[in-house]
Every structure is written in structure tokens, then in C-alpha cells.
Image (cartoon, helix red, strand yellow):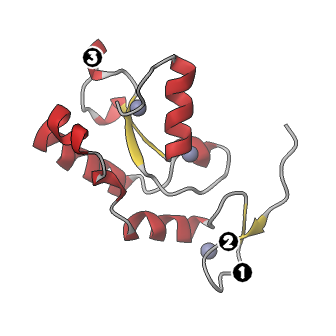
Amino acid sequence: MPRKPKRPCSYPGCPNLTDGRFCEEHAKEEARRYEHYDRDPATKRRYGRAWKRIRDSYAAAHPLCEECLAKGVYTPTEEIHHMLPLSQGGTHDRENLKALCKACHARIHAERGDRWHNA
Ligand SMILES: [Zn+2]
Ligand SMILES: [Zn+2]
Ligand SMILES: [Zn+2]
């Protein structure tokens, strides 16, 4: 796959070039700035309080989407994914979690054939 030319970071006044929307530093800053993690009330009902704590601390430790990062693209983490779904015996253990942006999260679930992408 040919690599796209780098573009300047979207952060106003930042001179860094990036493959994504932000340079590494500003992707992390964006991730910190927004509370991405609490938009879905269904999540709270399904996973409860303990999950919120685990998710927030995992997101704080992984402010960048891990899939994008593997490709050298810095995208703020928006959602935390369970690699083995809870419905299949997965847990909230860190080894079972992955920090993802919405696009990567949706893609992973689409590849897996899931109808819903909020697990
Ligand atoms: Zn920047
Ligand atoms: Zn991503
Ligand atoms: Zn998921």
C-alpha cells in the first residue's frame, strides 16, 4: 500500500507533519481534552461502574488509537474495545482491552461480522 504524503498537524500553529489528523503530541492532547468515553448511556447499563473506572484508566494510559499507532498514525483514543467480547467470556483485564478510534473500532467489528459495535 503506497503511503500517503504527510500533512501538517490540524492543531492551530503546529508545524509538525503527520499521517493522521494530528501529530503525536496533539493527538494525545485532543484525547485528554474531550470526554469521549461517556457518550453511550447503554454502555453504563451494560458494564456498570467498575468498567467506567477501568476504561478511563486504560484510556488515560493509551491516549492514542492502538491500531492507528501501529501504522504510524496518531489518532486520539475514542473508545475502548474488548478483544474477546464479554459475551464470549472476555473480561475487563487490560490484556483483553484495546484503545481505538471510532473508525478502527467500527472496522474491527465489521471484520468480525458484529452487528453492533459498542462492545
Ligand atoms: Zn501538532
Ligand atoms: Zn484508529
Ligand atoms: Zn469493540
Q: Respond yes or no on whether mark 1 lies under 8 Å from ligand 1.
A: yes
Q: Is residue 98 left or right of residue 21?
A: left
Distance from the alpha carbon under mark 3 to that under mark 1: 45 Å
Q: Is mark 3 within 8 Å of ligand 3?
A: no
The residue at 13%/38% (across/down) is 48
Give the mark nearer the N terminus: 3 vs 2: 2
Q: Assign the C terminus to one quadrant of the image.
A: top left
At 47% across and 68% down in the image, what residue appears? 30
* Residue to which mark 2 is pinned: 9
Assess disc 1: are there few (<14), some (14-19) or many (≥20) residues with their C-alpha within 10 Å of its C-alpha. Answer: few
- Occupied quadrant, residue 79: top left
Compared with 84, 13 (above or below) is: below
Amino acid, disc 3: Ser
Q: x, y percentage for residue 24? A: 58, 64
Instruction: State how far apart marks 3 and 2 are (Cα).
Output: 39 Å
Residue under numbered circle 3: 87
Looking at the rendered image, the quarter that the N terminus falls into is top right
CB under 8 Å between discs 1 and 2: yes
Q: 117 and 78: which one is in front?
A: 117
